[in-house]
Protein backbone atom coordinates (compact mmCIF):
# COMPACT_ATOMS: atom_id res chain seq x y z
CA UNK A 1 0.00 0.00 0.00
CA UNK A 2 2.80 2.45 0.86
CA UNK A 3 4.54 1.73 -2.45
CA UNK A 4 1.25 2.34 -4.32
CA UNK A 5 0.76 5.71 -2.60
CA UNK A 6 4.32 6.79 -3.41
CA UNK A 7 3.84 5.87 -7.10
CA UNK A 8 0.54 7.76 -7.33
CA UNK A 9 1.88 10.87 -5.65
CA UNK A 10 5.02 10.73 -7.73
CA UNK A 11 3.02 10.90 -10.97
CA UNK A 12 0.96 13.91 -9.92
CA UNK A 13 3.54 16.35 -11.18
CA UNK A 14 2.93 15.06 -14.74
CA UNK A 15 -0.86 15.41 -14.54
CA UNK A 16 -2.70 18.39 -16.02
CA UNK A 17 -3.96 20.81 -13.40
CA UNK A 18 -7.76 20.50 -12.99
CA UNK A 19 -10.08 23.42 -13.41
CA UNK A 20 -12.52 24.36 -10.65
CA UNK A 21 -15.39 22.74 -12.59
CA UNK A 22 -15.24 19.54 -10.55
CA UNK A 23 -16.40 21.33 -7.40
CA UNK A 24 -18.72 23.97 -8.84
CA UNK A 25 -22.36 24.26 -7.74
CA UNK A 26 -24.50 21.41 -9.09
CA UNK A 27 -21.64 18.92 -9.53
CA UNK A 28 -21.59 15.45 -7.95
CA UNK A 29 -18.76 13.50 -6.30
CA UNK A 30 -19.08 9.74 -5.86
CA UNK A 31 -16.42 8.05 -3.72
CA UNK A 32 -15.47 4.72 -2.20
CA UNK A 33 -12.75 4.25 0.41
CA UNK A 34 -11.19 1.60 2.62
CA UNK A 35 -10.92 2.58 6.28
CA UNK A 36 -8.05 1.38 8.45
CA UNK A 37 -6.80 2.64 11.77
CA UNK A 38 -6.93 2.04 15.52
CA UNK A 39 -9.52 2.17 18.31
CA UNK A 40 -9.35 2.64 22.08
CA UNK A 41 -12.24 1.99 24.50
CA UNK A 42 -13.15 3.25 27.96
CA UNK A 43 -15.95 1.88 30.18
CA UNK A 44 -17.75 3.08 33.29
CA UNK A 45 -20.18 1.17 35.56
CA UNK A 46 -21.96 2.80 38.51
CA UNK A 47 -24.70 1.84 40.97
CA UNK A 48 -25.23 -0.42 43.95
CA UNK A 49 -22.89 1.64 46.07
CA UNK A 50 -19.88 0.87 43.87
CA UNK A 51 -18.26 2.20 40.74
CA UNK A 52 -15.71 0.93 38.27
CA UNK A 53 -13.92 2.22 35.19
CA UNK A 54 -11.46 0.66 32.77
CA UNK A 55 -9.31 1.50 29.76
CA UNK A 56 -8.89 -0.99 26.90
CA UNK A 57 -5.94 -1.59 24.61
CA UNK A 58 -5.74 -0.02 21.17
CA UNK A 59 -6.63 -2.33 18.25
CA UNK A 60 -6.69 -2.03 14.46
CA UNK A 61 -9.74 -2.33 12.17
CA UNK A 62 -10.94 -2.23 8.54
CA UNK A 63 -14.17 -0.95 7.00
CA UNK A 64 -15.74 0.31 3.76
CA UNK A 65 -17.08 3.83 3.22
CA UNK A 66 -19.49 4.73 0.37
CA UNK A 67 -20.31 8.40 -0.16
CA UNK A 68 -22.18 10.67 -2.57
CA UNK A 69 -21.53 14.40 -2.47
CA UNK A 70 -23.59 17.19 -4.06
CA UNK A 71 -22.03 20.63 -4.36
CA UNK A 72 -24.61 23.15 -3.18
CA UNK A 73 -22.13 25.98 -3.84
CA UNK A 74 -18.61 26.22 -5.21
CA UNK A 75 -16.43 24.04 -2.96
CA UNK A 76 -19.24 23.34 -0.44
CA UNK A 77 -20.77 19.85 -0.58
CA UNK A 78 -23.45 17.88 1.28
CA UNK A 79 -22.35 14.24 1.59
CA UNK A 80 -24.64 11.42 2.78
CA UNK A 81 -22.69 8.22 3.43
CA UNK A 82 -22.99 4.62 4.54
CA UNK A 83 -20.24 2.91 6.48
CA UNK A 84 -20.37 -0.90 6.16
CA UNK A 85 -19.04 -3.43 8.67
CA UNK A 86 -19.36 -7.18 8.15
CA UNK A 87 -17.74 -10.41 9.26
CA UNK A 88 -18.25 -14.09 8.46
CA UNK A 89 -20.86 -15.81 10.68
CA UNK A 90 -21.93 -12.52 12.24
CA UNK A 91 -24.77 -10.05 11.74
CA UNK A 92 -23.85 -7.06 9.52
CA UNK A 93 -23.46 -3.64 11.04
CA UNK A 94 -23.68 -0.23 9.43
CA UNK A 95 -23.81 3.48 10.14
CA UNK A 96 -25.83 6.02 8.15
CA UNK A 97 -24.52 9.57 8.25
CA UNK A 98 -24.53 13.01 6.77
CA UNK A 99 -21.50 15.27 6.31
CA UNK A 100 -20.73 18.84 5.35
CA UNK A 101 -17.48 19.36 3.49
CA UNK A 102 -15.54 22.21 1.94
CA UNK A 103 -12.95 21.66 -0.80
CA UNK A 104 -10.30 24.31 -1.42
CA UNK A 105 -8.97 25.08 -4.90
CA UNK A 106 -5.28 25.86 -5.38
CA UNK A 107 -4.46 27.62 -8.63
CA UNK A 108 -2.55 25.49 -11.17
CA UNK A 109 -2.40 22.51 -8.80
CA UNK A 110 -3.85 18.97 -9.12
CA UNK A 111 -4.25 18.85 -5.31
CA UNK A 112 -7.39 20.08 -3.54
CA UNK A 113 -7.41 20.05 0.30
CA UNK A 114 -10.73 19.64 2.12
CA UNK A 115 -12.27 19.62 5.60
CA UNK A 116 -15.30 17.63 6.74
CA UNK A 117 -17.67 17.37 9.74
CA UNK A 118 -20.69 15.16 10.26
CA UNK A 119 -23.02 13.04 12.36
CA UNK A 120 -24.35 9.52 11.95
CA UNK A 121 -26.35 6.81 13.65
CA UNK A 122 -26.25 3.04 13.30
CA UNK A 123 -26.40 -0.37 14.92
CA UNK A 124 -22.76 -1.27 15.31
CA UNK A 125 -19.28 -0.19 16.27
CA UNK A 126 -16.15 -1.49 14.52
CA UNK A 127 -14.33 -4.09 16.62
CA UNK A 128 -16.47 -5.65 19.25
CA UNK A 129 -16.30 -9.21 20.54
CA UNK A 130 -15.85 -10.66 17.05
CA UNK A 131 -13.64 -7.98 15.47
CA UNK A 132 -16.59 -6.49 13.53
CA UNK A 133 -20.21 -6.98 14.50
CA UNK A 134 -23.61 -5.64 15.40
CA UNK A 135 -23.93 -4.08 18.84
CA UNK A 136 -27.64 -3.25 18.87
CA UNK A 137 -30.84 -4.25 17.07
CA UNK A 138 -31.84 -0.58 16.91
CA UNK A 139 -30.36 2.48 15.24
CA UNK A 140 -29.29 3.93 18.57
CA UNK A 141 -25.51 4.28 18.36
CA UNK A 142 -24.50 7.83 17.42
CA UNK A 143 -21.17 8.94 15.99
CA UNK A 144 -19.72 12.44 15.66
CA UNK A 145 -16.91 12.95 13.16
CA UNK A 146 -14.49 15.64 12.02
CA UNK A 147 -11.56 15.40 9.65
CA UNK A 148 -9.74 16.60 6.60
CA UNK A 149 -7.50 15.52 3.78
CA UNK A 150 -6.66 16.06 0.13
CA UNK A 151 -7.88 15.01 -3.32
CA UNK A 152 -5.12 14.30 -5.85
CA UNK A 153 -6.55 14.57 -9.36
CA UNK A 154 -5.36 11.86 -11.74
CA UNK A 155 -7.58 13.31 -14.50
CA UNK A 156 -10.28 15.97 -14.69
CA UNK A 157 -12.90 13.56 -13.33
CA UNK A 158 -10.99 11.07 -11.17
CA UNK A 159 -9.13 11.82 -7.93
CA UNK A 160 -7.16 9.74 -5.45
CA UNK A 161 -8.32 10.76 -1.95
CA UNK A 162 -6.66 10.55 1.46
CA UNK A 163 -8.67 11.55 4.53
CA UNK A 164 -7.96 11.66 8.26
CA UNK A 165 -10.92 11.24 10.62
CA UNK A 166 -11.61 11.51 14.31
CA UNK A 167 -14.84 9.71 15.28
CA UNK A 168 -16.55 9.34 18.64
CA UNK A 169 -19.05 6.49 19.08
CA UNK A 170 -21.04 6.16 22.32
CA UNK A 171 -23.45 3.54 23.67
CA UNK A 172 -25.45 3.66 26.92
CA UNK A 173 -27.58 1.08 28.71
CA UNK A 174 -28.65 -0.35 32.04
CA UNK A 175 -29.23 -3.70 33.73
CA UNK A 176 -30.39 -5.11 37.07
CA UNK A 177 -28.71 -7.70 39.26
CA UNK A 178 -30.57 -8.90 42.36
CA UNK A 179 -31.70 -5.74 44.18
CA UNK A 180 -29.36 -3.36 42.43
CA UNK A 181 -29.62 -1.41 39.19
CA UNK A 182 -26.60 -0.49 37.14
CA UNK A 183 -26.01 1.89 34.25
CA UNK A 184 -23.12 1.95 31.84
CA UNK A 185 -21.70 4.11 29.09
CA UNK A 186 -19.08 3.01 26.58
CA UNK A 187 -17.16 5.46 24.42
CA UNK A 188 -14.99 4.55 21.44
CA UNK A 189 -12.55 7.12 20.08
CA UNK A 190 -11.29 6.51 16.54
CA UNK A 191 -8.30 8.06 14.80
CA UNK A 192 -8.26 6.66 11.29
CA UNK A 193 -7.23 7.17 7.69
CA UNK A 194 -9.47 6.58 4.66
CA UNK A 195 -7.82 5.86 1.32
CA UNK A 196 -9.99 5.78 -1.78
CA UNK A 197 -11.06 7.15 -5.15
CA UNK A 198 -13.57 9.86 -6.15
CA UNK A 199 -15.36 10.25 -9.49
CA UNK A 200 -16.70 13.72 -10.37
CA UNK A 201 -19.82 14.24 -12.47
CA UNK A 202 -20.00 17.84 -13.75
CA UNK A 203 -23.25 19.76 -13.60
CA UNK A 204 -25.72 18.58 -16.24
CA UNK A 205 -24.35 14.99 -16.67
Image: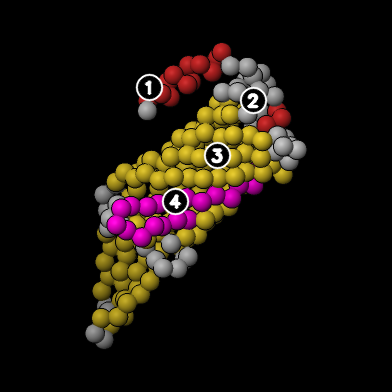
Mark linked to residue 156: 2
First along the sequence among labels 2 and 4: 4
First along the sequence among labels 2 and 3: 3
First along the sequence among labels 4 and 1: 1
- Structural distance between the alpha carbons of marks 2 and 4: 29 Å
- Structural distance between the alpha carbons of marks 4 and 1: 26 Å
Name the residue located 48 percent from the left edge and 45 percent from the top edge: 65
Circle 3 crowding by C-alpha within 10 Å: few under 14, some 14–19, many from 20: many
Secondary structure under the numbered disc 1 in the rendered image: helix
- Structural distance between the alpha carbons of marks 3 and 1: 22 Å
Quadrant position of the N terminus in the picture: top left
Quadrant position of the C terminus in the picture: top right
First along the sequence among labels 3 and 1: 1
Q: Which residues are magenta?
A: 76-95
Q: Is 76 located above or below residue 144 in the figure?
A: above
- Structural distance between the alpha carbons of marks 1 and 2: 24 Å
Disc 1: which residue: 3
Q: Give the foreground label among 1 and 2.
A: 2
Secondary structure under the numbered disc 2 in the rendered image: loop
Secondary structure under the numbered disc 3 in the rendered image: strand
203, 79: nearer the viewer: 203
- Structural distance between the alpha carbons of marks 3 and 4: 14 Å
Disc 1 + disc 2, Cβ < 8 Å? no
204, 196: nearer the viewer: 204
Disc 3: which residue: 31
Residue 186: quadrant of the picture: bottom left
Image coords of residue 21 (percent x, y): 71, 30
Image coords of residue 94 (percent x, y): 45, 56
Amino acid sequence: MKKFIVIVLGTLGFMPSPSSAQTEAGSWELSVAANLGSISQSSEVSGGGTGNSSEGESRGYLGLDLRAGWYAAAGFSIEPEIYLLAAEKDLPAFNLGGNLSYTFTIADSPVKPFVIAGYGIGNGIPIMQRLVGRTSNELDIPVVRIGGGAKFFLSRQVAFKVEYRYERYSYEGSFSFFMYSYSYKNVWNYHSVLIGVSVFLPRGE
